[in-house]
Image: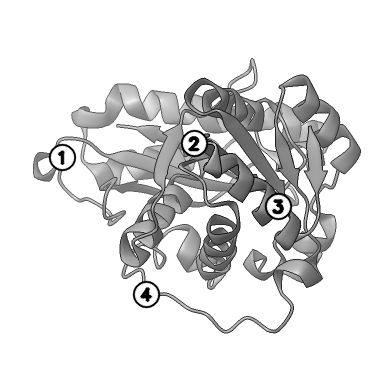
Amino acid sequence: MDVIQHILEIRNKISDLKAKNFRIGFVPTMGALHEGHLSLVRKAKEECNIVVVSIFVNPIQFNKPEDLKNYPRTIDNDLLMLEKENCDLVFTPSEAEMYPKTETLSFDFGALDKVMEGAFRPGHFIGVAIVVKKLFEIIQQDKAYFGEKDFQQLQIIKELVRQLNIPVEIIGCPIIREKDGLAMSSRNALLDPKMRILAPEIYKSLQNAALMERSCTPQILKEIVINEINATGLRVEYFEISNPQTLLPISDWKAITDAIGCIAVQAGKVRLIDNIKL
């Protein structure tokens, strides 16, 4: 497994591999890897000849300086985990390498980045789109793999690829959960013991919502889920029942054949997101 820090070096390496007609699979991450990330690596290994993983904590997608400061960084352990998965290349650029000058690029994603996460974290998805565009241009992958836990992010990346005609296939992969149902996240390591015990209540409520979905209106179902989770001591920031393509909220089950329930919950000082298909 080669660990490469510089853009020119990894571009040259990948250029050599593509000249041999190797298919490149790419898994972009911010490190603090867990089984969810590794499931993406395994999927990429199944479908591609070469798997590249990037580890870069992207500063421009954080709304609060303290969130960037507190984001877990476990590079040594990350590399050990990737080596065990037979990852081929790991790209670990510095901030100066990725952003040699102040970034001014912007995008118009319509409503996709204005609702849910976008409403609570303005500018977040522009920061995500900028770094993903940069990484795609560097890695020149055939396929890129993203977890469905970040469902809104996945839809925005698909729109980014569509708008810019980037020649890559975006693969969404299922949420990987702990045994108690909590969606795996790098942020889980920051939960205090009390909140770690409470956090699985998020998925329990989502499962209940999936069982109840058509027995009441979307608005009533939203209220049930919010009240149920808030009663545990967690605090719901939002729970939206939305069209999975447009991400706009729905008010009537008859208007759509499928829906997605997306939630953000404050668990003490840690913010968790999850979703379920309805």
Residue receiving disc 4: 108
Mark with earlier residue (1, 2): 2
Q: Quadrant of residue 65?
A: bottom right
Q: Which one is in front in this view, the residue at disc 4 or the one at disc 1?
A: 4
Q: Which percent across, then down, holds residue 132?
A: 55, 59
Q: Could you say whether the residue bearing mark 2 is in a helix, strand or loop? A: loop
Please indicate whether residue 79 sits to the left or right of residue 112 in the image: right
Q: Judge by depth and name the residue closer to the eye, 247 or 235.
A: 247
Is residue 182 shown to the viewer in this render? Answer: no
Q: Amino acid at mark 2?
A: Asn
Residue receiving disc 3: 10
Rendered residue at 72%/27% (across/down):
197
Badge 3 local density, few (<14 within 10 Å), some, or many (20+)?
A: many
Residue receiving disc 1: 253
Distance from the alpha carbon under mark 4 to that under mark 1:
29 Å
Distance from the alpha carbon under mark 1 to that under mark 3:
48 Å
Q: Amino acid at mark 3?
A: Ile
